[in-house]
Image (cartoon, helix red, strand yellow):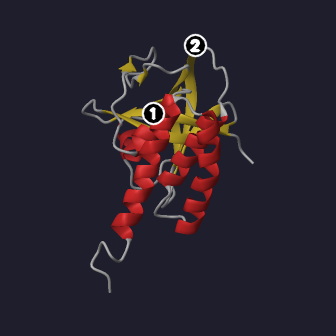
């Protein structure tokens, strides 16, 4: 089983617009694979500008924010590529796409690490931070997972948030809960007129 690291991936389109997305990147023989879903902005950007920054952060608001319409986070220039990194990243890795394995659902962009820069130490996640990241993954797959699975897992994750969250984790958690509620409200038969 390959190792997957949860990151914020920054990409850029050919007009210079930056996009941030939470993506689990896959370890690949000294490099990394970015496998965005099709269709997605990250996928389009990697095709247009074949570079990315993998940003490692412990601010889970960024994971939750990118999934709930709060995707404007400060960026900073990279050293080797024109795609910027997350300004508050603990570490960022500058990546160049070397080849693409096409797939109808999730093409794989195989990347070589050009440079890795540590900005601050990683002190570990508390349980609430880990819970927010797990909830963010659920929110990114709301259209693919059964509702009872999502709601059951959110209920379990809520326990860790309630016990160990700081204000930042509570804020991120509230964004994700609102996203889940809005998704199911929008998809319920009552909201669409029923049958």
The answer to which quarter of the image holds residue 164 is top right
151 shown above or below 77: below
Kind of element beneath mark 1: helix
What residue does disc 1 label?
A: 62
| Marks 1,2: beta carbons within 8 A | no
- Identify the residue shown where x is 45% and y is 36%: 171
> Outermost residue toward the right?
1
- Identify the residue shown where x is 39% and y is 50%: 40
What residue does disc 2 label?
A: 120
- Identify the residue shown where x is 63% and y is 15%: 121
> Outermost residue toward the left?
15
The answer to which quarter of the image holds residue 2 is top right
Residue 100 in percent (x, y) is at 51, 46
Q: Is residue 98 visible?
A: yes
> Outermost residue toward the bottom?
195
Q: Is residue 26 visible?
A: no
Kind of element beneath mark 2: loop
> How far is disc 1 from disc 2 in space, using C-alphas?
17 Å
Q: Earlier in the sequence, mark 1 or mark 2?
A: 1
Residue 45 in percent (x, y) is at 36, 40
Residue 150 in percent (x, y) is at 56, 60
173 shown above or below 181: above
């Amino acid at each position: 089983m390959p190792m997957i690291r949860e990151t914020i991936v920054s990409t850029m389109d050919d007009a210079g617009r930056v996009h941030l997305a939470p993506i689990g990147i896959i370890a690949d023989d000294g490099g990394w694979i970015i496998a965005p879903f099709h269709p997605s902005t990250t996928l389009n950007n990697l095709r247009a500008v074949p570079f990315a920054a993998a940003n490692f952060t412990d601010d889970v608001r960024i994971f939750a924010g990118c999934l709930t319409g709060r995707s404007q986070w400060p960026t900073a220039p990279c050293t080797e590529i024109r795609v910027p990194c997350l300004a508050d990243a603990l570490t960022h890795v500058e990546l160049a796409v070397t080849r693409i394995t096409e797939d109808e659902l999730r093409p794989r962009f195989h990347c070589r690490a050009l440079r890795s820069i540590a900005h601050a130490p990683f002190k570990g996640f508390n349980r609430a931070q880990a819970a927010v990241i797990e909830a963010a993954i659920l929110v990114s797959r709301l259209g693919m997972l059964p509702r009872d699975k999502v709601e059951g897992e959110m209920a379990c994750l809520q326990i860790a948030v309630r016990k160990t969250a700081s204000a930042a984790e509570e804020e991120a958690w509230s964004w994700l809960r609102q996203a889940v509620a809005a998704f199911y409200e929008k998809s319920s038969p009552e909201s669409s007129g029923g049958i």
